[in-house]
């Protein structure tokens, strides 16, 4: 019986119970049939009367025994039909749940138990549907997290490869210069000239290492900082103040067109770091007499600077680490190529959409932060 399917098992259990009840009922009818005595009084004439008693128990028993096979047969047929209908009614929903559960085991997204019932089986089906939807949602979240972690690890690996390549050139140049000075080769005997040059190279190398370390910590800090309600106008004005002074010293027109009040929820330090890098780039690549503008357009923050637009070919790589356009290959003018990479990393960690595109009139570049 343990290996038997649910339908035949339920059928035989139900049939056995009904036949047992039928058998008990017929046995009770047979054994509890009481003896019957029939009294007959006949008075055809006033002078003559006849009194007698007739025992009909034997005739009743014979009648019951004669009807018993037909009664048993009818009860057995009725029991079989009722057991079949009852077993089918009970097991069909359970078989449906089992079939759907197999589909769920194969992770079919459209699998669902469709039972229009409010009893315990219907509640079980609803619970299975809810559990499966929760499972699919959890799996989808894990897949997205796995993809995000994979992209993050790939980005870190690319960054480390680029960092090692960028560090290799100044380290090699510094080592070669020092070795030639130690060996006293040709012009490198002039220590007064090349010692300051070595110090300058080591300073640039230290700055680059500092930038690399700051960049590597940017994503980690973004994940650890909690988003809070911020008065964005005040924050942006505070961020613009030092760059307004730098712009004034360089003869650049700085126009902060900020609203009186604009509240939003975001991590203030990480957002401030990203905006500071954008402003630094805008001021660095704007010539004297040109304009840098910071203003709102609805819920978008626009930072514009008048300059020679970056070619489309370069824009595709502008957020890559250590990337510098051809016109900014000199580190003294173009930096280390980490500014916009940090901006992109921070804004992506905060789930803030952004774009960087050229302007036609006046010519320049526009960075848009979509809040």
Image (cartoon, rainbow, N blue to C red):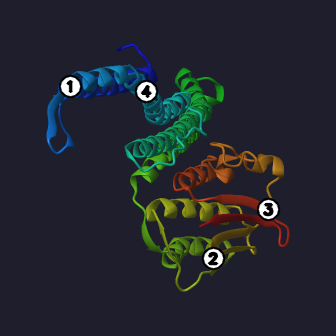
Cα distance between the residues tagged 1 and 2: 129 Å
Looking at the rendered image, the disc whose residue lies closer to the viewer, 1 or 2, is: 1
The C terminus lies in quadrant = bottom right
x, y percent for residue 337: 64, 47
Residue located farthest toward the bottom when viewing the structure as drawn: 260
Q: In the rendered image of this protein, does residue 304 appear above or below residue 182? A: below
Quadrant assignment, res 12: top left
Cα distance between the residues tagged 2 and 3: 24 Å
Return the residue nearer the eye: 85 or 297. Answer: 85
Q: In the rendered image of this protein, does residue 287 appear above or below residue 319? A: below
Residue 358 image label: 3
Task: Answer few, some or many: residues within 10 Å of disc 4's Cα (few below 14, many 20 plus, some between 14 and 19).
Answer: few
Q: Earlier in the sequence, mark 1 or mark 3?
A: 1
Task: Answer few, some or many: residues within 10 Å of disc 2's Cα (few below 14, many 20 plus, some between 14 and 19).
Answer: few
The N terminus lies in quadrant = top left
Check disc 4 and report its element: helix, strand or loop. Answer: helix
Residue located farthest toward the front when viewing the structure as drawn: 47
Cα distance between the residues tagged 4 and 3: 93 Å
Looking at the rendered image, the disc whose residue lies closer to the viewer, 1 or 4, is: 1
- The residue indicated by pointer 1 is 57
Q: Is residue 35 left or right of residue 231?
A: left
- The residue indicated by pointer 4 is 74
Q: Earlier in the sequence, mark 1 or mark 2?
A: 1
Query: Can you see residue 214?
Result: no
Return the residue nearer the eye: 101 or 42. Answer: 42
Cα distance between the residues tagged 2 and 4: 109 Å
- The residue indicated by pointer 2 is 248
Q: Earlier in the sequence, mark 4 or mark 3?
A: 4
């Amino acid at each position: 019986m343990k290996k038997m399917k649910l339908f035949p098992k339920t059928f035989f259990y139900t049939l056995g119970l009904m036949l047992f009840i039928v058998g008990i009922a017929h046995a009770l009818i047979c054994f509890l049939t009481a003896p019957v005595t029939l009294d007959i009084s006949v008075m055809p004439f006033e002078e003559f009367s006849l009194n007698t008693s007739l025992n009909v128990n034997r005739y009743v028993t014979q009648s019951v025994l004669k009807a018993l096979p037909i009664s048993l047969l009818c009860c057995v047929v009725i029991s079989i039909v009722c057991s079949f209908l009852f077993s089918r009614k009970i097991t069909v929903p359970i078989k449906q749940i089992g079939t759907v559960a197999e589909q769920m085991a194969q992770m079919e997204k459209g699998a669902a138990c469709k039972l229009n019932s409010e009893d315990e089986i219907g509640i079980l089906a609803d619970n299975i549907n809810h559990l499966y939807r929760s499972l699919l949602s959890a799996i989808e979240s894990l897949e997205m997290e796995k993809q995000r972690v994979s992209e993050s690890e790939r980005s870190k690996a690319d960054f480390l490869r680029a960092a090692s390549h960028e560090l290799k050139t100044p380290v090699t140049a510094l080592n070669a210069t020092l070795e030639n000075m130690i060996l006293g080769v040709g012009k490198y005997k002039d220590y007064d000239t090349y010692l300051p040059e070595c110090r300058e190279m080591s300073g640039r190398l230290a700055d680059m290492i500092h930038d690399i370390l700051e960049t590597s910590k940017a994503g980690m800090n973004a994940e650890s900082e909690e988003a809070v309600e911020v008065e964005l106008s005040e924050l942006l004005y505070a961020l613009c103040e030092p760059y307004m002074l730098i712009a004034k010293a360089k003869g650049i027109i700085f126009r902060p067109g900020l609203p009186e009040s604009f509240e939003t929820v975001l991590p203030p330090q990480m957002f401030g770091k990203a905006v500071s890098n954008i402003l630094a780039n805008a001021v660095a690549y704007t010539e004297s007499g040109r304009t840098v503008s910071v203003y709102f357009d609805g819920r978008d923050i626009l930072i514009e600077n008048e300059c020679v637009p970056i070619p489309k070919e370069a824009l595709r790589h502008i957020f890559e680490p250590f990337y510098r356009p051809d016109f900014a290959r000199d580190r003294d003018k173009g930096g280390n190529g980490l500014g916009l990479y940090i901006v992109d990393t921070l804004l992506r960690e905060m789930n803030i959409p952004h774009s960087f595109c050229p302007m036609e009139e006046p010519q320049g570049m526009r960075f848009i932060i979509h809040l």
